[in-house]
Image: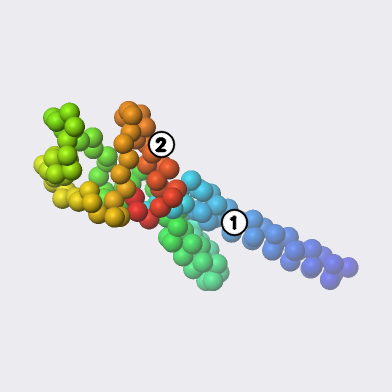
Amino acid sequence: MNRTHFLRGVSALCAMTTLSLSLGCGTILYPERRGQRTTARVDPGVAVMDACWLLLFIIPGVIAFAVDFSNGAIYLPGGHASGAPLKVVRTDAAHPDRAAIERTIRQQTGLPIRLDDPTMVRRELPSRRDIEPSLAAARQVRPNAL
């Protein structure tokens, strides 16, 4: 009888540990944050949960931190890779050429760009409402590029 109670206790402890470890990982708690590349602030709630596992069990804690940092789930949402929000750039020309677009962007943002760069992702959008969905789709295809 003692052995049966002991095994039930160990099984319950293992089940609770597995459940709380899976709930203490930012990747599982916040799946929408996966893949974000950001310089935003670290989410203190996720960091504390990962740190608790680091204090209790070294290996699961290290794994939790490694997974959350590697896929971006530990960061608070809303940050951008450049640290700046999106900016709409307008040009006066009705049909600007490549040089005019590059010059306008450089003047209005201070960022030099080359539209002929093969890594540059360019899209012509029918309206401003299409910017966010287009960015979301691009982040799905190339999560580390944006």
Q: Nearer the viewer, residue 33 or 61?
A: 33
Q: Nearer the viewer, residue 35 or 52?
A: 35
The residue sitting at 35% across, 53% down in the picture is: 145
Q: CA distance from mark 2 to mark 1?
A: 31 Å
Q: Nearer the viewer, residue 36 or 132?
A: 132
**Type of the residue with mark 2:** Pro
The image quarter in which residue 136 lies:
top left
**Type of the residue with mark 1:** Ser
The residue sitting at 18% across, 43% down in the picture is: 98
Image mark count: 2
| Residue 51 visible, this angle | no
As drawn, 133 above or below 56: above
The percent position of residue 112, horizontal first and vertical second, equals: 15, 50
Q: Disc 2 vs disc 1: which is toward the camera? A: 2
- SS at badge 2: helix
The percent position of residue 9, horizontal first and vertical second, equals: 75, 63
| Residue 73 visible, this angle | yes
The percent position of residue 23, horizontal first and vertical second, equals: 58, 53
Q: Earlier in the sequence, mark 2 or mark 1?
A: 1
The residue sitting at 51% across, 66% down in the picture is: 63
Look at mark 1 in the image and give the residue it sits on: 22
The percent position of residue 87, horizontal first and vertical second, equals: 23, 37
Look at mark 2 in the image and give the residue it sits on: 133
The residue sitting at 75% across, 63% down in the picture is: 11
As drawn, 47 above or below 88: below
